[in-house]
Image: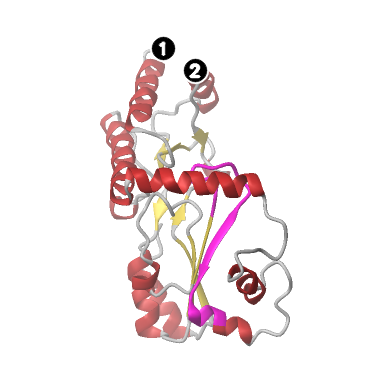
Amino acid sequence: EAITPDMLRDALKAKHYEAVTIVHNETSTGVQNPVEELCRVVHETSPDTLILVDAVSSLGGVKIDMDACGIDFLLTSSQKCLALPPGLALASASDRAMKKAESVTNRGWYFDLLLMEKHRIKDSTPMTPAMPLIFALDFQLDRILAEGLDARFARHTAMSKKVQDWCMAHGMEPLAKPEYRSRTVVTVKNDLKWDISALNKFLKTRDMRIANGYGKLKDLSFRVATMGETSLKDIDMLLEGFADFMKQ
């Protein structure tokens, strides 16, 4: 289930919070929370509450207008929609978040935004970063801009819809409600009771694999990543693999 604006509004009216954290895209369930609407509720109901957004599996595949939403801190990582190896944490902080940081006496070391900003304005970092990944990120951002942001977002939407449509046409429903379905990962109810391990062994012969359900959803669902540099052609090949697996 997604977090709805009404749920958040009720929580904010019941108690005051210094910050609200929002997971934009939940990879285990394939739910994309309505971040724009949720941010609007926070600004209307509790204007002094900071908004922190986990965009680990959405940034780079879904449009997020941080300024328009009034997000104070947005965090992502390199290994999802940016299609890089894991190892980089990327974040953006608002002026309001930086001012809040000034009031915190014990900010620690690793998450000290003021220390990071002090080095950022000098094109540096407080500690040695993973330099190969920094260069890879620089290269990949050029590729993303060359594709065009609107085109990239549209591709992610088209890939997820193609998987959803195929599964529904073959008797399997996505786990999330239509209005909250992720564009970057499709979690499908395993209504046909596929043996996911056997499916992956079959797909491995074609150099592909999918993910089983997570936690309690293991074997009750499966997940298809529709993110990063995956193409519509890749999705077509995967769905062809699904169809051939069903013929066995």
> In the image, is 232 to the left or to the right of 205?
left
Q: Nearer the viewer, residue 56 or 152?
A: 152
- Answer above or below: position of 88 versus 228: below
Q: State which region is magenta.
A: 77-98
**Residue that numbered label 2 is attached to:** 202
For the residues labelled 2 and 1, the Cα–Cα distance comes to: 10 Å
**Quadrant of image for the N terminus:** bottom left
Q: Residue type at mark 2? A: Phe
Tell me residue 151's x, y (percent). 29, 45
- Answer above or below: position of 51 versus 124: below
**Quadrant of image for the C terminus:** top left
Q: Which of 58 and 219 is in front in this view?
A: 58
> In the image, is 179 to the left or to the right of 85?
left
Query: Is residue 147 shown to the viewer in this render?
Result: yes
Mark 2 or mark 1, which has the lower sequence index? Answer: 2
**Residue that numbered label 1 is attached to:** 248
State the SS at label 2.
helix
